Amino acid sequence: MGLSAWVGILQDAVIQGILWGIMVLGVYMTYRVLNYADLTVDGSFTLGGAISAVYIAAGVNPLLSVFLATMGGMLAGLVTGILH
């Protein structure tokens, strides 16, 4: 394996670590601040990814699909808040 392959692997690992770190902060805040095991953060990440993928596959502008995915995640949090 050449040096460029190792750099690519390291770059991918850092990118995933940053994304997972954001999710972990959300989970930590719900445990620490609310004293409530709210896993909406985990579900809203996958929901947003699914919404974005569906819209991009349908030919929608990627920026619009990210906006719609964000709205979907916010809606998931709203439903969780109302149910709680």
Image (spheres, rainbow, N blue to C red):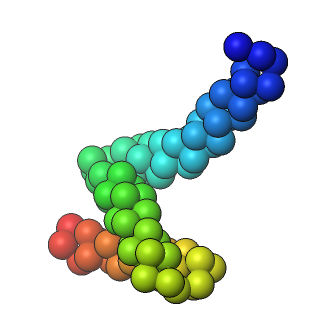
Q: Identify the residue shown where x is 49% and y is 48%.
A: 23
Q: Residue furthest right?
A: 3
Q: Which of 40/57 is in front?
A: 57
Q: Which of 54/69 is in front?
A: 54
Q: Identify the residue shown where x is 49% and y is 76%.
A: 56
Horizontally, is 64 left or right of 77 in the view? Answer: right
The answer to whether one can see residue 54 in this image is: yes
Total marks placed:
0
Q: Residue furthest left?
A: 83
Q: Identify the residue shown where x is 57% and y is 47%.
A: 19
Q: Position of residue 69 (x, y in %)?
A: 46, 75
24 is higher (above) or lower (below) than 78: above
The answer to whether one can see residue 48 in this image is: no
Q: Identify the residue shown where x is 81% and y is 18%.
A: 3
* Residue 1 picture quarter: top right
Q: Residue furthest front?
A: 1
Q: Which of 55/14 is in front?
A: 55
69 is higher (above) or lower (below) than 9: below
* Residue 12 picture quarter: top right
Q: Which of 24/30 is in front?
A: 24
Q: Position of residue 68 (x, y in %)?
A: 48, 82
Horizontally, is 26 left or right of 40 in the view? Answer: right
Q: Position of residue 14 (x, y in %)?
A: 67, 34
Q: Quadrant of the C terminus?
A: bottom left
